[in-house]
Image (cartoon, grey):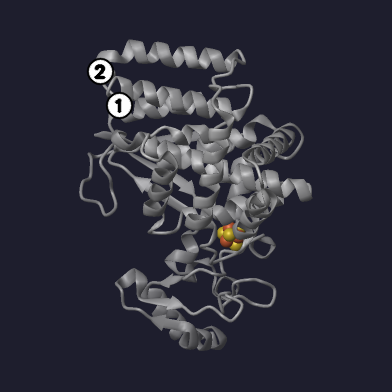
């Protein structure tokens, strides 16, 4: 007999689709794959309107049972099954059980390991963003254990259990991000320093656990006592890095606007604000980044982002959903930089946006959902982000740390 654990953060159990009230519906701008069984069901449906729409708009692909056809979107980029009240007519008239696998599971997903199953949801759904960021309990993890006859192997999609070392690193990382601190950047810097310590001991926790634990405890103490872990660096170099990072994110992410244009708009607002073509001296760029920094402080002190759980939950979600550091500790710094770069970009977009208008929960939901649509649902994004990180680091492997402050 073996124990199999099921993990569900509270946001997963509390989520409910808001349907027609959605800020960015998932039924637009995306290619929707239809499985063979659902394809036949729609084509042969006794519901005349659904059958007619299906015959006209389900385009045969025959790329396996789960990708038998795809939905042709209308001229507004919307799913043709959406009615005038923004309701899905398949769901409305045939019920939830008639939905395709893609439509019935989004935004949910799960990863199955030999000894546990982890449930999550994608941040490309704005309602998931609301649940994750603005519910103080969102990232409490509920665990259930069940006795199973033995490890079943060769299940489709099943992964090997993660090693004990990875589980311990995950727990340390989780606690460093969760700890109270003077601001969230201090938590990120604590995690950076902890990763460098792990690299220093070659991830050999077996022989160096006491030293690593002491280092971790010291970081936690510093965070909880409000001590700053930020290292003072050359601000001009740091701002040059930030400008480079914004430029590569524009190329790698913002231009890729399929479903909506929120991130592209946000990127243009940053470009307009920095307006580098008009700058005559590097000090003027420094002054602009100072202004963004001040604006971010203002947001963190007096906006919908100011409750301590909001930004912390975003980062905990990132750790949970990637099961940081994953199976390959060799690229732990790269995984960390992905989190840093995402956070840095969102922070800059929200700061510049809030210089024009107050930001509220809805702006934050749309911004993060739009960004996540580009970074969580694209097969080529990993290669593009690797390219971005290499370009920012410029060969030294540590320049990305300058983006934290
Ligand atoms: S994006 Fe989320 S809340 Fe909006 S319609 Fe899709 S599942 Fe529902």
Name the quadrant where ligand 1 sits: bottom right
Q: Quadrant of the C terminus?
A: top right
Q: Which residue is mark 1?
A: 165
Residue 308 sits in which quadrant?
top right
Of residues 234 and 223, which is closer to you in this image? 234
Instruction: Determine the secondary structure under disc 2.
Output: helix
In this rendering, does residue 282 appear at all? yes
- Say how many tags the image has: 2
Instruction: Say if 154 sits above or below 62 in the image.
Output: above
Residue 135, position as x, y percentages in the image = 64, 39
Label at residue 399 = none
Label at residue 206 = 2
Instruction: Say if 278 sits above or below 59 in the image.
Output: above
Residue at 57 percent of width and 37 percent of height: 239
Of residues 68 and 216, which is closer to you in this image? 216
Q: How dense is the environment of label 2, judged by Cα within 10 Å: few (below 14), some, or many (20 and up)?
A: few
- Circles 1 and 2, Cβ within 8 Å, touching? The answer is yes
């Amino acid at each position: 007999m073996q124990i199999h654990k099921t993990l569900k953060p509270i946001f997963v159990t509390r989520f409910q689709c808001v349907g027609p009230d959605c800020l960015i519906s998932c039924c637009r701008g995306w290619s929707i794959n239809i499985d063979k069984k659902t394809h036949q069901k729609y084509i042969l449906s006794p519901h005349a309107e659904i059958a007619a729409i299906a015959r006209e708009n389900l385009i045969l692909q025959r790329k396996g049972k789960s990708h038998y056809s795809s939905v042709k979107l209308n001229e507004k980029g919307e799913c043709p099954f959406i009615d005038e009240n923004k309701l899905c007519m398949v769901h409305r008239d045939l019920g939830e059980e008639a939905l395709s696998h893609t439509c019935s599971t989004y935004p949910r997903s799960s990863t199955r390991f030999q000894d546990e199953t982890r449930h999550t949801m994608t941040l490309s759904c704005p309602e998931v963003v609301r649940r994750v960021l603005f519910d103080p309990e969102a990232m409490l993890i509920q665990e259930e254990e069940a006795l199973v006859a033995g490890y079943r192997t060769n299940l489709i999609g099943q992964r090997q259990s993660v090693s004990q070392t990875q589980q311990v690193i995950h727990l340390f990382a989780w606690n460093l991000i969760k700890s109270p601190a003077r601001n969230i950047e201090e938590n990120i810097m604590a995690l950076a320093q902890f990763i460098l310590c792990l690299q220093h001991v070659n991830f050999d926790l077996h022989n160096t656990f006491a030293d690593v634990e002491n280092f971790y405890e010291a970081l936690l103490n510093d965070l909880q006592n409000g001590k700053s872990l930020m290292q003072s660096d050359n601000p001009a170099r740091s701002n040059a890095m930030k400008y480079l990072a914004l430029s590569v994110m524009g190329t790698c992410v913002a231009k890729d606007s399929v479903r909506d244009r929120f991130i592209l708009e946000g990127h243009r607002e940053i470009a307009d604000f920095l307006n580098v073509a008009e700058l005559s001296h590097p000090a003027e760029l420094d002054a602009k980044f100072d202004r963004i920094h001040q604006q971010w402080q203002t947001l963190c002190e007096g906006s919908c982002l100011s409750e301590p759980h909001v930004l912390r939950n975003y980062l905990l979600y990132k750790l949970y959903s990637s099961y940081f550091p994953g199976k390959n500790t060799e690229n732990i710094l790269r995984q960390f930089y992905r989190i840093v770069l995402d956070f840095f970009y969102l922070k800059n977009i929200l700061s510049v946006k809030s210089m024009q208008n107050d930001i509220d929960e809805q702006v934050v939901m749309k911004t993060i959902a739009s960004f996540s649509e580009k970074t969580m649902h694209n097969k080529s994004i990993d290669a593009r982000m690797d390219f971005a990180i290499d370009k920012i680091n410029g060969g030294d492997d540590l320049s990305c740390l300058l983006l934290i402050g």
